[in-house]
Image: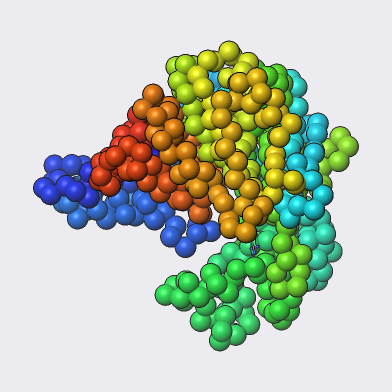
Amino acid sequence: ENAVAVWDRLHSAADPLPQLPYSVLALGDSNYSEFCGAGKKFDDRLAELGARRIRERADCDVDYETPANAWIEAVLGATPAPLPADALKAGCSRKNPFPARLLLNRRLNRDGSEKDVRHFEIGLAESGLEYEVGDALGVVPQNCPELVEEILLALKCDGEEAVPAPDGSETGLRQALARDCQITQIPPSLLAWVARRSGEADLLALCDEARVKERDAWLWGQEIIDLLLAFPGAVPAPAEFVGLLRKLQPRLYSISSSLKAHPGQVHLTVGRVGYHSRNRARKGVCSTFLSDRLHGDATVPVFVQVSKSFRLPEDADRPVIMVGPGTGIAPFRAFLHDRRASGARGRNWLFFGEQRAGTDFYYEDELDPMLSDGHLTRLSLAFSRDQPEKIYVQHRMMEAASELWAWLQEGAHFYVCGDAGRMAKDVDAALHAICETAGGLSSEAASDYVKKLKSEKRYQRDVY
Ligand code: FAD
């Protein structure tokens, strides 16, 4: 969000910028085909405007620290400042997660639902770990042991084979597959290796960079185990196999509790990912680790991911409008608990949606009393499958256009959380439409109004 204004400026700049020295540090995830796409665009545009590149762009993958620090040192001539002491407290970093205990795992859907969304309560005990509402929790998962065994079988290994661990030491293959490596989605490195070793013309063709769309379509719904079983003659040796895999990454979850209401705890609202493809049942790594595989005294390594750009208004009297369908409700439950505990007087309006009211109305038992006692000023619900036509949160926004516009005029902050694919775009379009229909703005003025909301940090999104 905070790069849009700079980007727009650079694009509308008519004059060249020959005096401007620059260098780009691009961040990304090489699982995606447009790896570091935004950074590349900035770099190209600045070059087009004649700015002076003082150092080649650095493209960083998910483990960004080493190349990013090298870039910072080279460009700024400075060693990156060490983290402040409070950020180094146990559990505060991705590198040093806190082994937390799972206190509660409760399904939020009733029987008959097509969804499986869980409410988790995690104990922070003596961790010293703190968070603010709006932050996310990083969870370090382990892979499904049955899948590990299937892969070992396909590799014709017993799991004891020595392979390199991420820290440079040595570990057993079973351990590496369970703990260190991403063993579901097929990385391009493994695909290329199997294509070369098998000599399969179709596979080799898919490795051509010009055919990235075809490759993505072919890979959709396929996992490493499928590739190993389909090409049993092209199976790497243990250490080589591990070298071709990506590192298993932590997953982030919007925190759905407030420390003011639940001291020593952090709550999450997680959709369990499970689906069928090519005749196999598949499981999302982290959501099923939390839902299915944490029993008894087992602990889950967690850390806090600070989200400075998703915060309640500093002025507690300001109204807030929160749009959070599905698991998008998570940070808004936290906002509501926090505002109640701190006695914030600003009005609260929540838009929530899911498939069916009877089975998928998350936290109904908490929201109803909040609505009755007035803490929740308005609750707008959109259950898409309870009537012949699909109704979503953006439709409820449009129905309440004039009230929503009035709240914005009174200084409300507008928040969106949840699905980035469609929901966030539809909600954004509805917001623009409301500025036009209820606010009487032209389409250009509506777009300026929304931009201004963003620059004033009154339009904040946490979408994934
Ligand atoms: P993965 O193992 O990562 O599998 C997911 C992948 O499986 C998909 O990317 C896709 O490639 C594949 N896939 C999924 N469905 C299908 C299908 N039908 N057919 C073929 N392939 C498919 N999630 C929440 O539930 N609640 C939250 O509050 C929340 N907050 C988030 C906040 C942030 C800032 C971010 C970045 C993400 C958040 N997420 C949240 C998403 C969460 O981090 C994980 O991405 C999610 O739980 C899935 O992780 P997983 O390990 O279970 O699945």
How many numbered callouts? 0
The answer to whether one can see residue 106 in this image is yes
Foreground residue, 394 or 210?
394
The way the protein has been coloured in the rendering is rainbow
Whole-percent x, y for residue 258 in the image = 64, 23
Most distant residue in the left direction: 15
Whole-percent x, y for residue 331 in the image = 59, 33
Foreground residue, 77 or 333?
333
| Residue at (27% x, 55% y) in the render | 44
| Residue at (82% x, 69% y) in the render | 153
Most distant residue in the top direction: 343
The answer to whether one can see residue 464 in this image is no
| Position above or below: 235 against 394 | below
| Residue at (49% x, 32% y) in the render | 321
Whole-percent x, y for residue 32 in the image = 50, 59
Foreground residue, 315 or 430?
430
| Position above or below: 300 against 264 | below
Foreground residue, 43 or 311?
311
Q: Quadrant of residue 176?
A: bottom right
